[in-house]
């Protein structure tokens, strides 16, 4: 009798193993790595001559490189809300003309009613972890563990907030010290270090991510690694000081590249690389006002805070051995919002039908099944206002504005400026006078968008009486 029960138990065990393997195969793991203020031209594979990024270059060589991949915003908070919810941030109230990002004295954060990638995947059996910069609300109810993540390890807002020393801000940033900023490092809802030691923060984020991967190798899992850098102030671990010909900024990027290499190595060592999508991108363009402490948008115009393409077009690298064809340069217009819809499709989760989702499913493009455009238009918001719009290769600017300068050159344009981004990705040659019919088509796209827009109340402008 004991033998009988032993045999039955073994059969049940092996059947469970087989089921687990089948479920895992049907639900690939997902790792999203999100840099902060990294520009379109900052990686070797996107043409930088002196920043060495062998691991990110390998992602491109063995996977897919997007040449027209956009963030939904040109600054931190709204871009993160868009990635995690698949929605333009104005829909969730996470875009504002009054206060463009959240601060340590902000009252609100990402509303509980919003559905994140983590919440949707958790419903279908995924383990979830958020590592790094959050910036979607620092009060308990807004932190990652209340938005679908099983665990959180990171800083709740930008690494330059809570500055506690006086002096000229550029001098402070040019020779930064950890103690200049009272930024907290958190685990779940608890502050575990303050100020966070930013010299080792990239390394520790990486170790946390690798540990999560190894602990959940039987899958499925979703890891969201949002690096604090290369947002200023710039810090690196000692072993990366002075390694780059590009100076401190290059050192920071090369440490982030090392981080990606550690993740790829962990996936390969655990034998799950061919069942994992690894995606690398950035929240917005380079912070140009910081000169060599900021990055480069390459041939693109503008940078962080702007709706010129340099502020919103980002590197987009996808690596999934055996599924994504190697060495493909993908020219379709895609967005960070598409990662929401793509992740849900991969995990077998239903896309919410009670709200507008702006993200598109990139799986057919990633797998090579289809090279067709997933969208024929794109709307460029600055805060809660439409500044530009794109239809096909044509981009019209209704408003242009520089960023972070005393004279920020706010200008309204009627007729709007018009550029053909296929011919002129640097947006240098206004051809509006030659194509009034194209301008009208883009106006029609914007009108249709506005007619269907239901914007949530501004969640960024309100301040709290208590300071975090």
Image (tube, helix red, strand yellow):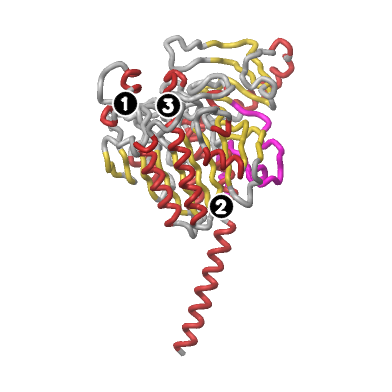
In the picture of the structure, the residue carrying the numbered disc 1 is 176
Relative to 48, does residue 268 appear above or below in the rendering?
Answer: below
Q: Nearer the viewer, residue 455 or 400?
A: 400
The image position of residue 86, as x and y in percent, is 54, 38
- Quadrant containing the C terminus is top left
| Residue depicted at 63% across the width and 50% down the height | 323
Where residue 106 sits, quadrant-wise, is: top left
Q: Which label lies toward us, 1 or 2?
A: 1
Which secondary structure type mostly characterizes the magenta part of the structure? loop
In the picture of the structure, the residue carrying the numbered disc 2 is 347
The image position of residue 325, as x and y in percent, is 66, 46
Tell whether 182 sits left or right of 437.
Answer: left
**Residues shaded magenta:** 350-379
| Residue depicted at 52% across the width and 36% down the height | 281
Do callouts 3 and 1 mark residues in contact (Cβ within 8 Å)? no
Q: Nearer the viewer, residue 106 or 237?
A: 237
Q: Which label lies toward us, 3 or 1?
A: 3
* Element on which disc 3 rests: helix
């Amino acid at each position: 009798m004991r033998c009988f029960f032993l045999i039955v138990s073994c059969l049940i065990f092996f059947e469970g193993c087989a089921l687990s393997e089948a479920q895992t195969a049907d639900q690939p793991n997902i790792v999203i790595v999100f840099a902060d203020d990294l520009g379109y031209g900052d990686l070797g594979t996107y043409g930088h001559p002196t920043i060495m990024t062998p691991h990110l270059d390998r992602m491109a060589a063995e996977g897919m490189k997007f040449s027209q991949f956009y963030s939904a915003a040109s600054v931190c908070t709204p871009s993160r809300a868009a990635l995690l919810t698949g929605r333009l941030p104005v829909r969730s109230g996470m875009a504002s003309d009054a206060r463009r990002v959240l601060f340590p004295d902000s009252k609100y954060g990402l509303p509980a009613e919003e559905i994140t990638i983590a919440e949707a995947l958790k419903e279908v059996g995924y383990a979830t972890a958020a590592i790094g910069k959050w910036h979607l609300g620092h009060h308990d109810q807004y932190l990652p563990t209340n938005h679908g993540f099983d665990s959180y390890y990171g800083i709740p807002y930008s690494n330059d907030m809570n500055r506690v020393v006086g002096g000229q801000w550029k001098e402070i940033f040019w020779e930064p010290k950890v103690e200049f900023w009272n930024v907290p490092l958190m685990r779940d809802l608890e502050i575990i270090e303050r100020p966070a030691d930013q010299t080792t923060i990239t390394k520790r984020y990486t170790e946390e991510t690798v540990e999560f991967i190894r602990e959940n190798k039987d899958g499925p899992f979703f890891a969201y690694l949002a690096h604090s850098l290369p947002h200023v102030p710039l810090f690196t671990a000692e072993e990366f000081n002075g390694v780059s010909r590009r100076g401190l900024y290059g050192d920071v990027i090369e440490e982030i590249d090392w981080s990606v290499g550690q993740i790829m190595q962990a996936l390969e060592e655990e034998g799950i690389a061919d069942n994992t999508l690894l995606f690398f991108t950035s929240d917005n363009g380079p912070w140009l006002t910081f000169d060599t402490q900021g990055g480069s948008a390459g041939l693109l115009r503008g940078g962080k805070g702007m709706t010129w393409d340099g502020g919103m077009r980002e590197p987009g690298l996808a690596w999934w051995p055996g599924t994504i064809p190697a060495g493909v340069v993908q020219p379709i217009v895609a967005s960070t919002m598409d990662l929401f819809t793509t992740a849900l499709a991969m995990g077998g989760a239903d896309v919410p039908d009670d709200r507008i989702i702006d993200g598109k499913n990139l799986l057919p493009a990633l797998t090579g099944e289809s090279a067709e455009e997933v969208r024929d238009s794109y709307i460029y918001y600055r805060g809660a206002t439409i500044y530009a719009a794109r239809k096909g290769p044509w981009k019209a600017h209704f408003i242009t504005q520089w960023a972070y300068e005393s004279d920020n050159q706010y200008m309204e344009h009627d007729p709007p400026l018009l550029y053909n981004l296929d011919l002129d990705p640097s947006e240098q040659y206004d051809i509006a006078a030659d194509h009034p019919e194209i301008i009208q088509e883009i106006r029609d796209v914007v009108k249709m968008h506005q007619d269907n827009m239901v914007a949530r109340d501004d969640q960024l402008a309100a301040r709290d009486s208590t300071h975090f």
